[in-house]
Image (spheres, helix red, strand yellow):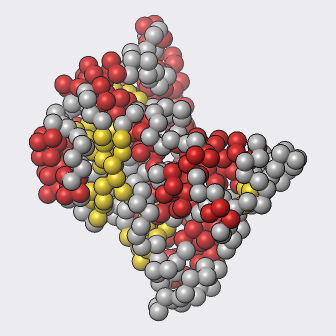
């Protein structure tokens, strides 16, 4: 593992600036920089690249960015990863071209079981109803609907979303305050462009949190400040110490990845902070529809529509392939939001009209009710299997969403566990991949949205085997599984 320390200037070698706006997602820029360094011989075959944690600290980015880049280059054949050993360069300019993913041979076996978070049940996508909605609007769309689209989104969908959010999320909104976007990341990027136009330069994000939200903030040219999250959600005391910060992105109903729900007291504190700072709260409403212990929690946007944005999408309820989302903006910022994103294109109009029809006919509510029952049963099955096979683990974040946290004994090398699992076809994600500070107890983030019920027992059996390969000393209550 010492090889990589012979070259301490990785930030200079790779020429990746996490704070630079534009130029695509940071993990993609790092992937291209590493690939270029290998292709031109600056990284020689056999050389070890830094551990993901070390390179993330060197570059000033999240560990998720580095692990995504490494995984892509392993799949392409430029890097080779082995359990218990450094990840090394496996190609040189004198070598044959590396095999691309999907070729005759791959660096990793195909994924048999997917416990990574981020996807709904794609098998259960309502194909017939969606096709019926598309067919209906294709035949009934007015002539003017087929012309140049409204940059804010089709008025019919904006009206439908406003009514849906008032009814289901307790939001305070009118069609004029709704804008259609391609999803939460796209919506956040547009909001950050508007905040920048208002003179806001620094935005707080939750730590741990979804890496692509951080990328959206930096991509809009703003500085990111991670703020800690505990059992009651984001910590306002940590936020108040970030003096330049005038905006914060929060998952109020269900924080990713911890699963925390922002307490009523902290919601009120955040709104008070936004008023005092002349700033804004951006509420990430990414999977709030899936609550299993009570009715879905009302959006905090209703506390102060003048200071809170609400951003949502159908990526976790229907499919990310649809590319359909929405923003609810404070009225005073609507002109700025539109002028700051003048060239941003809305999703295709017929898709917007199809979603409006899908919601208006009650099919969306029916789909959500069925999905909640399915996901609740699947969550219960996963928790039972983990209790039986991984008794040393502690499960958290079960009340809502499409993933849970599996806390593991201190000393567990979760990166090694993820690598060992990948070698046998099980996709896992460690909590460190979402941490900006890269500190805290070891844990895995286990998604159950897009795995079949019958696949959960064998998936947990492979997880048990991967844990058994971890060289960390056993926990006092550690018991081997079958």
Quarter of the image with the C terminus is bottom right
Relative to 77, is 197 above or below? above
Would you say 313 lies left or right of 253 here?
right
Q: Position of residue 429 (x, y in %)?
A: 54, 62
Front in this rendered view, residue 282 or 247: 247
Would you say 243 lies left or right of 357 here?
left
Point 21% across, 30% down: residue: 330
Q: Position of residue 168 (x, y in %)?
A: 27, 43
Front in this rendered view, residue 95 or 399: 95
Relative to 101, is 184 above or below? above
Would you say 162 lies left or right of 444 here?
left
Point 61% across, 82% down: residue: 471
Residue 383: in sight, yes or no? no
Point 47% across, 51% down: residue: 61
Q: Position of residue 281 (x, y in %)?
A: 24, 42
Q: Quadrant of residue 336?
A: top left
Quarter of the image with the N terminus is bottom right
């Amino acid at each position: 593992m010492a090889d990589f320390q012979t070259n301490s200037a990785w930030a200079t070698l790779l020429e990746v600036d996490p704070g630079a706006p534009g130029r695509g997602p940071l993990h993609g820029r790092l992937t291209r920089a590493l690939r270029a360094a290998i292709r031109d011989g600056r990284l020689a075959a056999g050389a070890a690249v830094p551990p993901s944690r070390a390179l993330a600290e060197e570059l000033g980015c999240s560990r998720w960015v580095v692990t995504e880049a490494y995984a892509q280059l392993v799949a392409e054949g430029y890097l080779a990863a082995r359990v218990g050993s450094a990840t090394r360069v496996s190609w040189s300019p004198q070598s044959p071209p590396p095999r691309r993913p999907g070729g005759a041979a791959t660096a990793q076996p195909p994924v048999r079981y997917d416990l990574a978070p981020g996807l709904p049940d794609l098998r259960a996508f309502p194909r017939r109803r969606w096709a019926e909605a598309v067919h209906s609007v294709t035949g009934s769309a007015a002539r003017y609907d087929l012309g140049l689209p409204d940059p804010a989104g089709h008025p019919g969908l904006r009206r439908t979303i406003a009514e849906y959010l008032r009814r289901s999320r307790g939001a305070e909104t009118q069609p004029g305050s709704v804008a259609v976007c391609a999803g939460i990341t796209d919506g956040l990027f547009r909001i950050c462009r508007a905040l920048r136009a208002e003179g806001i330069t620094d935005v707080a994000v939750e730590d741990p949190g979804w890496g692509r939200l951080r990328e959206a903030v930096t991509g809009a040219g703003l500085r990111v400040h991670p703020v800690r999250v505990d059992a009651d959600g984001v910590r306002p005391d940590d936020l108040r110490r970030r003096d330049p910060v005038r905006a914060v992105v929060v998952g109020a109903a269900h924080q990713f990845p911890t699963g925390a729900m922002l307490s009523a007291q902290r919601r009120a504190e955040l709104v008070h902070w936004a008023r005092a700072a002349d700033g804004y709260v951006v509420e990430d409403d990414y999977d709030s529809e899936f609550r299993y212990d009570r009715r879905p929690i009302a959006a905090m946007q209703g506390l102060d529509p003048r200071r809170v944005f609400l951003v949502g999408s159908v990526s976790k309820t229907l499919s990310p392939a649809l590319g359909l989302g929405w923003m609810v903006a404070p009225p005073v910022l609507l002109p700025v939001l539109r002028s700051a994103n003048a060239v941003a294109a809305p999703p295709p109009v017929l898709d917007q009209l199809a979603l409006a029809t899908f919601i208006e006919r009650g099919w969306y509510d029916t789909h959500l009710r069925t999905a909640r029952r399915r996901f609740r049963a699947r969550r219960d099955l996963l928790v039972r299997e983990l209790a039986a096979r991984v008794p040393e683990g502690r499960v958290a974040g079960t009340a809502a969403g499409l993933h849970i946290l599996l806390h593991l004994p201190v000393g567990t090398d979760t990166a090694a566990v993820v690598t060992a699992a990948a070698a046998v076809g099980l996709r896992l994600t460690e909590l460190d991949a979402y941490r900006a500070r890269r500190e805290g107890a070891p844990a895995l983030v286990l998604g159950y949205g897009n795995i079949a019920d019958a696949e959960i027992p064998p998936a947990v059996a492979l997880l048990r085997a991967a844990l058994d390969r971890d060289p960390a000393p056993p926990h006092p209550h550690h018991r081997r599984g079958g």
